[in-house]
Every structure is written in structure tokens, then in C-alpha cells.
Image (cartoon, rainbow, N blue to C red):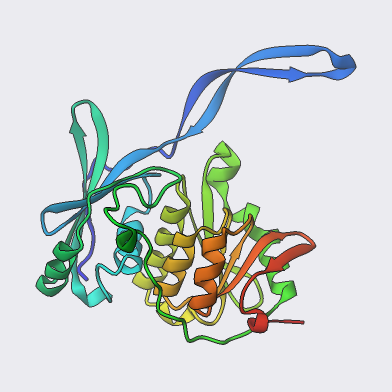
Amino acid sequence: MRAVNEDSDLQSALSVQRPASDWRRGEANTPSCTQVQDDIVCEVPVALVYNGISHVVMMATPDHLADFALGFSLTEGIVQNLQQIYSMETVRQADAGIDGIEVRIDISTEQFAALKTVRRNLTGRTGCGLCGAESLQQAIRKPVPVTGEHPINHNAIENAVGQLADHQPLQAQTGAVHGAAWCDAAGNIQCLREDVGRHNALDKLIGQLSSAGKENVFNKGFALISSRASYEMVVKAAAMNIGILVAVSAPTSLAIELAEAANITLVGFARPGRHMVYSHPFRIVD
């Protein structure tokens, strides 16, 4: 893949300050209200355009968009490898007063022809990955089972959870973003990406590791996400042969079912001193 060409005006703020009234109940049950400037995370529409055709618009945090586009392309099966992506260009757009960003991706003729057969137009809301799907078959993708069986121990999960906050500066500043981290077998965080959308954060992480030529790590460590484990997160993990997915919050029933089918070890409620293993526990040892 050729280097990403970015618009010179693309450098976007990740947060802005907005006035707010900070109401608190103080000592002796006495309330107080202070006018403050609060740090608010930025959320912008990001269109992924393949060979000149707009495929999807996602609401996202405007950073690491090349990672996002690459990760999305891989986890959604639009391309199978980096060689099928010829170039990317990120361009700011202002349409009808709405400030947004286009990521223009040039892919191989074969992959573009395949994309057109399953093409969907959707607006990805922060909490939804299925808006615009036209059928149940299109909405629920059956993942291919992963093959990695490298184990980790329970202490590695605790270690990673303990490091998570230190690797999320935008979350610390705004309190409004998810994080997706790649952890080695000892639970040390190697890379983390943040976004207002949990799916976007995972795509950014996968895109970053893939562009750095680190696809071979996917079955040797584990992914840690600061959100719940929804079915889409399991499908994206399966697409990259990630054998262990650890979530800080709860899984959904469909996520567990798909993790079972995909041979993924799914861990939920990963907190200091506690986590729950919902599928294929053989990868986590004492």
C-alpha cells in the first residue's frame, strides 16, 4: 500500500471546551454550582469511499483515520490483505454546513467487484453497527473459527486492566471515548487506540498493527476493550484470528454464541481482582 496522503487542513482537534454548570452537593449537604469550561470529545462524520463510491459513513473521533480505514476494510472483509489496497487519501469536506472527513481508498478491481455485490449504505451511530443492513443474513455474519491456541494466565488479564487508564489520555480528559488495546502474553499493553465508537477503536487498533506488519501477533496475545463485548466485536476479532477478547464490561448473548462458534475465548467484567470467562476457557491457565 502506498503512503497515505492527508489534506494539509486535516489536523483536527480531538476535544473542545464548552461552557457548563457544574452542580455538586458539598459538605453539610450544601449544594453549589460553578460555571466551568468542560473538555468535550469531538465527533465527526467519516466517510469511507472505495474507488470513488461512498460505502459507509461512521461517526468517529478524527484521529488515526488511516488506521481506522485499514482496520475496517480488513475486519469487514472488503480486502483480505494490504496488497489489495493501493492507496488512501484523507480529505476534509464541508457539505451543507456539516464538517466531515472522507477517506478515499483505492482497492483492487477484484475486491471492488466483490464489494459491489454486498454493498450497503449506512450511517454508523456511536452505539450501533447494523444501521442500514438490508437483511438478517447481511446483519449477522458467521465468523470463520480462529486457529491460535497460545495461552495466557489470569494475572495477565489483571495486569492489562491495571494499565488501561494510563494508556487512555483522551478518556481521562473527556470521559467519553472507548479504548481498544493489544496486550502481550504477560498483559503488557503494546498499543492502544481511542474513539467515541467501540467498533471504531478496535478497527483503529487492528489497522495500526496491520500497517506496522504485526499481524502475526494476533494469536499470541489478546485484545482488551473498555466497552461491552457485542457481537460485532467478536466478528472483528475472528476476522483477524484473535483468539482471546477481553472486555471490561459485559458480553451479549449473541457475542457468547459467536465466540463459541468462532473458537474465541471471550472474557467479560475484567476488573481488578475479577473477570469472567464465557467461552473456550482452555486458553486461560493458572
The answer to whether 109 appears left or right of 184 in the picture is left
Residue 12 shows up from this direction: no
- Nearest the camera: 177 or 3? 177
In the rendered picture of this protein, how many numbered marks are placed on residues? 0
Q: Can residue 13 be seen in this snapshot?
A: yes
Q: In the rendered view, would you say 40 is above or below 80?
A: above
- In the picture as drawn, the residue positioned furthest to the front comes out as 136
Q: Position of residue 241 (x, y in %)?
A: 44, 78
Percent across and percent down for residue 68 are 35, 57
Q: Residue at x 20, y 38 (%)?
A: 93
- In the figure, 75 relative to 144: above or below? above
Can you name the residue that lies furthest to the right here?
A: 28
In the rendered image, residue 85, in percent from the top left (x then y), is placed at 20, 69
Instruction: Name the quadrant of the N terminus.
Output: bottom left
Residue 238 found in image quarter: bottom left
Task: Indicate whether 180 appears above or below 47.
Answer: below
Q: Residue at x 35, y 64 (%)?
A: 71
